[in-house]
């Protein structure tokens, strides 16, 4: 029942008031991000220090390494109604723990397929790499991902 | 549970776009939150005292500091709560500055997002438990990678402080770039005269071991206890026997490129980079050696009075233990030939790089300090310098300023007048002149007025050959006119970039680097010599372009940080590590397979069965095993599954 239309209230509008009130299908989407401490969290910091403006739809959860991320976290987020899930870590070769992101990559390649299989369109799930110095890249990743999710609109109701 | 929430104004950094007072008020509506405040600067003394007071007065057992990035102040606030008797790991930060107020200019938007960030932090705080640090003993030996002036300075400081230091240098001699320079700005003192005594000090210091012609292959372990594999490259010369007499070099019949002289003139296949090399030992470049290429020659073996030549020599590898590592791998000159076809791409003989010019100026260089045209050896009458070749140029992906070229060009312009006579015409094409160091501006003025070097503001668009001259075509942007100068010699102030292989080394060490390969410091202002990997430090140009005074100052700063670290006999390790609940362990050993640090081990229980156990002091807390364990029986302290799921739930609470 993916993407079922269900006009249940979702008062979590973050950017101003959505026209039509809470629960309107064009409310701002909410995206959960899970990022590693050393590269992408720090990259998001770098973006902040550089004042690189971003859409305000993202909520970040910090973990030490993408290798710590159980694909279940992403599924859980979708189950709880996330409109998108973004996962980001260190570039291949740059993992603070030398190989955590390789394990993550393997898991997320599979998880990605499973997520699509569950009926969630690919635009709603992304995993990528952003290093600590790539503030601009972080801005771009977030902006583009959120725009893609916003284009699909909110996932009304539970999809899982 | 009694949680206190502190929403920092950070002056106007946060309060400018986030309504902190409103958030402090709202925080009180959250479950378990019994106290909130919105201090002006939470990290300041009164700010920290306020937290400590609240912990005592309100009997708080969790604290959420909603302020900047934990990378900025997590340690600060852990100490704060510890000072009030709370376990430091019961403090959680909500990053509403870097991740919110600084990127969302709209007050309403910023405030709502900050609210959610705070709610997530409170949700996580509920899951925190007290954690206690372990202690590990510390190896007090220091590894320095790179034997340029940065590595040398750090080594001497550390060795003088009584620590044992090993310098691993990839070339056969230490000295680095500075050993190639002629004179140094702004004092025009001889580079070798100030450097070579320090090189000798290194070789004679009882606490310093030199491992030249060697490279770091593998690094494992962690702060206080690194294990490093070092490969010594085969020099085809037994260095225990070689005395550096140079006879083999003189007699060798095969030519090879002279990297020390930046390729100006060839050296021999067996070479010693320069007379003051430390250690002064010969090595064979096998790709150019007649014996290795044709199977016949062996002249060096015949003439060597020490019987040191060993054609069978192989690379050797040693494993050593260190407590701290200093990276000082320095610079490489920007390979302008590959990027500036408008300057001839290396095909015009009389166009050379700044570092080549240093070798030309140098009395122990290939021309004995005689400045000459490369094409015909004639004395130049007109010399043109072009600045910012491979610096401040987006088109070649070098947007940064190399920081030393304005000054070294001025120095070289002055030396040109000195070597070739005051009647030589010397021009410098520049974009801006950056002379910010002590005595630097005065130096530039002297070069312009006293030595009559003509500074032309503008970029050179083309270099081409005509009638034996190099035609320099550019614009004088101050006069607004085209200029064309027939030059005898053109010197490009080629920018600097990190050493070849810097990125790979950074990966080996698990430290961050930027897009150019400069290694990333722990914090641009507050931790300029540390990296984000505890126990690994930086010195010199490997971190960012800088001149010798700044390099030496940084290297001494680095040394003092290393001394500070190794002054302790034991180090506290992070308690945010993986722990196995052995009751559910199915002994599949997947955790052992995936751990990059060999932290999990098979532990024999009383009943004779084996279960996984994570060695506390070895675990680095990445959590790979946690996400791998098929029965979810490993937990990562500080980042528990419950804490993560609670944050997800909190943020999506209102979503369905
Ligand atoms: C043309 C030119 C002129 C200059 N003139 C001046 C001047 O007049 N005054 C001034 O103050 N500054 C000058 N500078 C700048 C000066 O050269 C640098 O500030 C200084 O050399 C930096 O020292 P360093 O030790 O960081 O790097 P380097 O001197 O480059 O030393 C790095 C060392 O590390 C070694 N190394 C690299 N990678 C590895 C590895 N993976 N493993 C082991 N070893 C490795 C290298 O072989 C080298 O020996 C000039 C620079 C240039 C290019």
Image: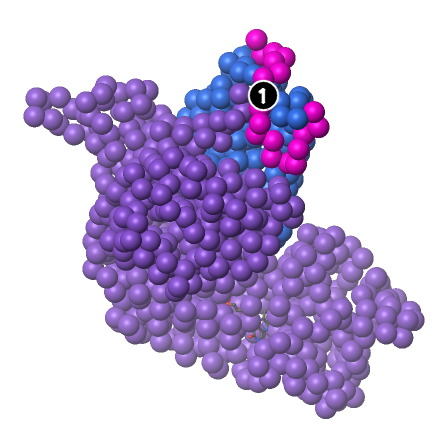
Which residue is depicted at the point 43% across and 32% down?
B647
Magenta residues span: A1-20
Q: Is residue B378 above or below residue A20?
A: below
In the foreground, B455 or A3:
A3
* Coordinates of residue B155 in the picture (x, y in percent): 36, 68
Q: Residue B478 magenta-drawn? A: no
The chain in purple: B
In the foreground, B639 or B579:
B639
Side (left or right) of B280 relative to B183: left
The residue where tag 1 is placed is: A9
Side (left or right) of B459 relative to A157: right
* Coordinates of residue B248 in the picture (x, y in percent): 45, 66
Return the residue found at the far top: A1
Tell me where residue B51 sits by quadrant.
bottom left
In the foreground, B454 or B97:
B97
Type of secondary structure dominating the magenta stretch: loop
Regarding residue B438, the answer to whether it shows in the image is yes
Quadrant in which the N terminus of chain B is drawn: top left
Which residue is depicted at the point 23% across and 61% down?
B568
């Amino acid at each position: 029942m993916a993407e079922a239309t269900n006009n249940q209230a979702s008062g979590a509008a973050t950017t101003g008031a959505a026209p039509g009130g809470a629960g309107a299908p064009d409310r701002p989407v909410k995206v959960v991000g899970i990022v590693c401490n050393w590269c992408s969290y720090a990259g998001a910091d770098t973006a902040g220090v550089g004042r690189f403006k971003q859409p305000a739809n993202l909520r970040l959860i910090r973990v030490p390494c993408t290798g710590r991320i159980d694909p279940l976290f992403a599924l859980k987020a979708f189950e709880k109604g996330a409109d998108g899930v973004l996962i980001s870590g260190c570039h291949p070769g740059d993992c603070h723990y030398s190989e955590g992101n390789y394990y993550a990559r393997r898991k997320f390649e599979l998880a990605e397929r499973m997520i699509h299989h569950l009926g969630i369109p690919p635009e709603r799930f992304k995993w990528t790499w952003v290093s600590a110095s790539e503030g601009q890249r972080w801005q771009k990743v977030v902006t583009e991902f959120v725009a893609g999710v916003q284009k699909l609109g909110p996932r009304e109701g539970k999809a899982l | 549970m009694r949680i206190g929430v502190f929403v920092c104004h950070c002056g106007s950094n946060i309060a400018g776009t986030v309504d902190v007072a409103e958030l402090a008020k709202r925080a009180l509506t959250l479950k378990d939150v019994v106290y909130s405040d919105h201090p002006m600067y939470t990290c300041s003394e009164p700010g920290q005292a306020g937290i400590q007071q609240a912990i005592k007065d309100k009997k708080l057992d969790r604290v959420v500091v909603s302020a900047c990035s934990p990378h900025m102040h997590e340690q600060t606030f852990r100490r704060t709560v510890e000072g009030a008797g709370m376990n430091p790991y019961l403090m959680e930060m909500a990053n509403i500055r870097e991740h919110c107020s600084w990127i969302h200019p709209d007050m309403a938007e910023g405030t709502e997002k900050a609210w959610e960030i705070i709610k997530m932090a409170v949700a996580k705080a509920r899951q925190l438990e007290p954690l206690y640090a372990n202690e590990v003993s510390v190896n007090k030996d220091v590894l320095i990678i790179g034997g340029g002036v940065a590595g040398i300075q750090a080594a001497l400081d550390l060795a003088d402080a009584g620590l044992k230091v090993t310098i691993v240098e990839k070339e056969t001699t230490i000295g680095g770039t500075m050993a190639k320079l002629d004179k140094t700005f702004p004092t025009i003192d001889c580079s070798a005269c100030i450097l070579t005594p320090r090189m000798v000090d290194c070789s004679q210091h009882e606490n310093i071991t030199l491992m030249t012609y060697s490279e770091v292959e593998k690094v494992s372990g962690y702060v206080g206890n690194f294990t490093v594999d070092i490969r010594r490259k085969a020099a085809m010369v037994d260095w225990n026997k070689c005395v550096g007499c140079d006879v083999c070099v003189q007699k060798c019949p095969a030519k090879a490129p002279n990297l020390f002289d930046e390729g100006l003139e060839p050296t021999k296949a067996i070479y010693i980079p320069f007379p003051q090399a430390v250690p002064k030992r010969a090595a064979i470049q096998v790709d150019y050696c007649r014996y290795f290429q044709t199977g016949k020659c062996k002249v060096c073996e015949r003439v060597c009075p020490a019987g040191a030549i060993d054609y069978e020599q192989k690379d050797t590898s040693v494993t050593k233990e260190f407590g701290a590592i200093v990276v000082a791998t320095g610079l490489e000159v920007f390979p302008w030939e590959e990027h500036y076809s408008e300057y001839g791409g290396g095909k015009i003989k009389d166009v050379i790089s700044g570092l080549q010019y240093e070798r030309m100026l140098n009395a122990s260089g290939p021309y004995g300090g005689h400045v000459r045209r490369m094409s015909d050896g004639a004395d130049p009458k007109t010399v043109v310098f072009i600045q910012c070749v491979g610096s401040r140029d987006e088109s070649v992906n070098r947007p940064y300023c190399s920081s030393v070229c304005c000054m070294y060009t001025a120095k070289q312009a002055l030396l040109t007048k000195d070597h070739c006579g005051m009647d030589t015409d010397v021009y410098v094409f520049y974009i801006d002149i950056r002379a910010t160091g002590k005595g630097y501006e005065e130096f530039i003025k002297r070069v312009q007025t006293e030595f009559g070097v003509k500074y032309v503001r503008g970029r050179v668009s083309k270099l081409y050959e005509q009638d034996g001259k190099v035609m320099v075509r550019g614009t004088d942007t101050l006069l607004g006119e085209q200029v064309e100068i027939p030059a005898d010699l053109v010197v490009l102030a080629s920018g600097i970039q990190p050493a070849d292989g810097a990125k790979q080394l950074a990966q080996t060490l698990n430290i961050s680097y930027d897009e150019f390969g400069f290694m990333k410091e722990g914090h641009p202002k507050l931790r300029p010599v540390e990296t984000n990997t505890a126990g690994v430090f930086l010195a010199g140009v490997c971190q960012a372009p800088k001149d010798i005074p700044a390099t030496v100052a940084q290297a001494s700063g680095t040394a003092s940080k290393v001394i500070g670290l190794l002054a302790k006999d034991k180090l506290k390790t992070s308690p945010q590590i993986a722990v196995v609940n052995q009751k559910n362990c199915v002994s599949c050993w997947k955790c052992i397979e995936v751990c990059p640090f060999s932290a999990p081990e098979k532990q024999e229980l009383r009943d004779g069965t084996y279960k996984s156990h994570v060695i506390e002091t070895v675990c680095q807390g990445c959590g790979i095993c946690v996400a791998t364990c098929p029965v979810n029986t490993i937990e990562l302290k500080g980042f528990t599954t419950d804490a993560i799921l609670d944050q997800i739930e909190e943020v999506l609470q209102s979503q369905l």
